[in-house]
Amino acid sequence: MSRPHAWTKLLGRAAVFAACGLPLALIGFDALGGRLGANPIATIMNRLGYWTLFFLLLSLVPTPLKTLFGWTSPVRFRRMLGLFAFFYACLHLGTYVGVDQFFDLPAIAADIVKRKFITIGLLAFLLLLPLAITSTDRWVRRLGFVRWKRLHRLSYLAAICGVIHFTWRVKADLREPMIFAAALAGLFAVRLLAPLVLRSGPGTARAESVARAQELGRLRIDPARSSCGEARS
Amino acid sequence: MKITPLPLYLRRREFLALGAGSVVGSAAISLSLARSALASGEPTPPPLPNLRKGPFGTDERQNSFADITHYNNYYEFGTDKSDPAANAVVFPTRPWTIAFEGEIKNPQSVEIDELVKWFPLEERIYRMRCVEAWSMVIPWAGFPLAELIRRLEPTPRAKYVAFTSRLDPSKMPGQRRHVLDWPYVEGLRLDEATHPLTLLAVGLYGRPLPNQNGAPLRLVVPWKYGFKGIKAITKVRFVEKEPPTTWNRMAPSEYGFYANVNPDVDHPRWSQARERRIGEFFKRKTLPFNGYADQVAHLYQGMDLRRFY
């Protein structure tokens, strides 16, 4: 396969990478400028948690976009988005363990056992762990694509746990967690309903969109590899 | 042609970023902690006249004016801690009338500027423990609620004091959303209300109370969680039965009527054993009744504080 515009792709990837790092950079700038408020530890932890959930949900967007509209380019960024979600999750958890609790392991253990929002938050992190480990091409080959794909459906479970973690943490104002919940429900709906709708016969939205994409030359369909291509970036 | 092993490449950068991020992060945290402790942010309005030193003051280090006025739970002006400082600036606190009613000999309505002339103002440096497990040391200015109650002469039927805050969605933007039942209401048992520690505050750091801290008049009950300290009081009613309180109505299993600071009774969703003093890195142990046990523990003799949390 030839890859024209390899440098444009690389540039696009670099741009997305930089954008994903921006929330962390902003936390750093705000910290240096003394703009994290009176309780900087809580602010940092909350912001890192927010962006973890944001990128986790964002990593679930490319596939529905492909299903609905035949857009394949966002799929190329899916792995990066997922890994950034994991990256922010590590920082979020690390801040809780190392800064907020300052490695007070008995207190952390008690929190995990007694506080269900922490239990489910940790569960979300543990679900992300195998996905981050098996995010390489090598692991896709080792597991075989079908099994790899099945494993990576755990990202949905992790997202559900993450949204519940946020919801249970909030004192009274549920607006932000509910926005995340609605977004996740929307993504679920597309996943569950799209196959039913799109599979209903020839001339369906999917077929049309694929045909359109082919006409426009945006897509090179190789039926034998198309599903595998989805997994690669 | 072999594709560059992008994942490895990417992850190498992420691990680098992780390392750099944690170094930057920890440096940043210590820096901003130092800053928030140093910044005193001079308050602007003229000092309150004839302010005298009151009793019960702690000699612990006071939190900065900037921290006290920019880290507020005051949902009438938004649910983010920084919202009240931003949204309460234009809140009109004059003219302001407070109604005293119910089981008292002299029901009446009083202008706030008249009310503050009734009693000499005292400075009270109190610890403030939020139910969210953080705390501050705040130099309030005000007068003991007990003196006001003495003047209003409660009848023998008065057993509780019920407070009502302002309801004005046009000036309190947070009230346009039903996050809590508006207006905010709070209450105390009469013996709690007449305890010499219980304060009606009109000032902070020797100056008139900033809007985001509850101007023109707020309650301060230092041995209870901060949410008992109702802000922008418009009505004080003396009643026979325990009055409803806002957070208790919102989540009865999480917030009780008494809400005494108690390290042994956890909030269902988090521990109350320790707290972070704003400006400090390490958490400190939370004290029973927020360190005021010697003064107030007798009020609750024989009560099961696990049940009456």
Image: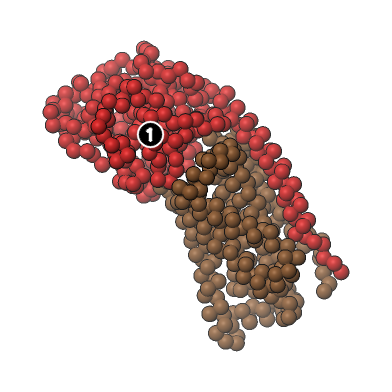
Which residue is rendered at x = 60% and y = 85% of the image?
A203
* Chain identifier, brown in the render: A
* Chain identifier, red in the render: B
Mark 1, secondary structure of its residue: loop
* Position in image of residue B297 (x %, y %): 31, 26
Can the viewer see residue B1 in this picture?
yes
Which residue is rendered at x = 36% and y = 44% of the image?
B254
Which residue is rendered at x = 70% and y = 72% of the image?
A144
* Position in image of residue A172 (x %, y %): 41, 47
Q: Mark 1 points at which residue?
A: B262
Disc 1: which chain? B
**Which quarter of the figure is the N terminus of chain A placed in?**
bottom right
Identify residue type, mark 1.
Asn
* Position in image of residue B203 (x %, y %): 39, 23
Q: Which of B229 and A203 is in front in this view?
A: B229
**Mark 1 residue crowding within 10 angstroms, few (<14) / some (14–19) / many (20+):** many
Q: Which of A78 and B76 is in front in this view?
A: A78
Extreme-right residue of the structure: B1
Q: Nearer the viewer, residue A53 or A202?
A: A53
Q: Does residue A207 lie above or below B75 as drawn?
A: below
**Which quarter of the figure is the C terminus of chain A placed in?**
bottom right
Q: Which of B164 and A51 is in front in this view?
A: A51
Would you say A116 lies left or right of A199 here?
left
